[in-house]
Amino acid sequence: MREHTNSLRWSIVWMILLVLGMPLRAEAQRVAKYGADFLSGGVGARALGMGSAYVGLAQDVTAGYWNPAGLHGLDYPEVAYMHAERFAGIVSFDYGSVALPVNARSTVGLSFFRSGVNDIKNTLDAWDPERDQPKPRPETYFTSFSAADYAFFLSYARALGERLSVGLTGKIIRRTIGDFADAWGYSFDLGLQYRTGRFVLGANLQDVSTMLQSWSINPDAFRLEDVNPDTGQPYTFEEVFEQELPEGGSYLVLPVARLGSGVVLPLGASHLTLGLDLDFAFDGQQAYAFNLGDVSFHPRLGTEFSYRGVLAFRAGLSRITTSDQYGLDVVPTVGTGLRLKQVSLDYGFGDFAGLPSDLGYSHRISLQLRLEQPGLAR
């Protein structure tokens, strides 16, 4: 009985602390290393199948995420949707976007993201504060809540010549953890893409303004349903578990510089595409990344063979890291795609090797539609 009591007590405490993912007391404007981590997995099964080496190659509707300057590569309006299951299906991720050429030089795009974990157990009311132990049949007092992250991107690209284009993406982030806490965040990305012959170079400065996320905590959500006879009010979390609740505050998400390159090699009626990206992060990550002081480096490699522009086969390395414990660690990805007239259907598969393999596989499926109508051409 004591073991069961301790297990439930700690499940309550850690449920709160781990779900919030915040220190017990938040200092003003602390740096949050994982403040927008739900967006780091990327979008579009084509890009993900190529190891996410897509900053230089992005010239479709998904460029609103990878590199807003690449939106200039659209000749017609495009619509895309992707669904992904990560960590053995625990986390669901949905992405939708639309992009529209405005005139010969300008393109606009709108993107929506949702990442969520559903059916998280709230065990607060399964604890009996009077007896300081679980209630009989504690599972009957469990309730459920969801933790969800949302993002809205508004992108604009403009050509500065035949080879050079620039882009800007404004970002709004919304994060919710049931009724317990919520946050808003704001920032923008700057992109550049240069094309010459078969080669392309790109750069995307993510959160160049430094994203500011403001968290708010709802203390009432932590109150138990049982009433304290001394106060006549519901028991508070602090009274029962002798743990302080987190406080709201502001967090900073530091910029990341993403550089990309690519080349398209014709092979008769088919072609081979190669991509190489390198991210520069300034969050002090050192444990599992190549680094120089507080700057860490994250390379990615990708390739795609397209047969007559209809059937594509892809492979890549989405993560290349090193550590004293594991040595060199790489995470490969594979994918395939089918293009039929104005519709593309793509599939990507990853996280099946390296350190993340313990958390399950990731499947990504995306659908892309090009509205190739004469009246809609750029």
Image (cartoon, rainbow, N blue to C red):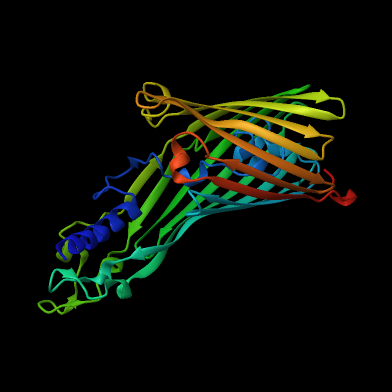
Q: Quadrant of residue 147?
A: bottom left
Can residue 36 be seen in the rendering of this structure?
Answer: no
At 30% across and 57% down in the image, what residue appears? 15
Q: Nearer the viewer, residue 58 or 323?
A: 323
The image shows residue 170 at horizontal and vertical percentages of 56, 45
At 49% across and 32% down in the image, what residue appears? 256
Can residue 27 be seen in the rendering of this structure?
Answer: yes
The image shows residue 368 at horizontal and vertical percentages of 73, 49
At 40% across and 29% down in the image, what residue appears? 288
94 in relation to 197, above or below: below
At 33% across and 66% down in the image, what residue appears? 122
The image shows residue 77 at horizontal and vertical percentages of 77, 48
Question: Left or right: where does residue 198 sit relative to residue 281?
Answer: right
368 in relation to 309, above or below: below
Residue that sits furthest to the right in the current view: 374
Q: Quadrant of residue 56?
A: top right
Residue that sits furthest to the left in the current view: 230
Q: Quadrant of residue 8?
A: bottom left
The image shows residue 316 at horizontal and vertical percentages of 61, 31
103 in relation to 325, above or below: below
Quadrant where the C terminus lies? top right
Q: How many marks?
A: 0
Q: Nearer the viewer, residue 211 or 235?
A: 235
Q: Nearer the viewer, residue 207 or 224?
A: 224
Quadrant where the N terminus lies? bottom left
313 in relation to 141, above or below: above
Q: Nearer the viewer, residue 188 or 81?
A: 81
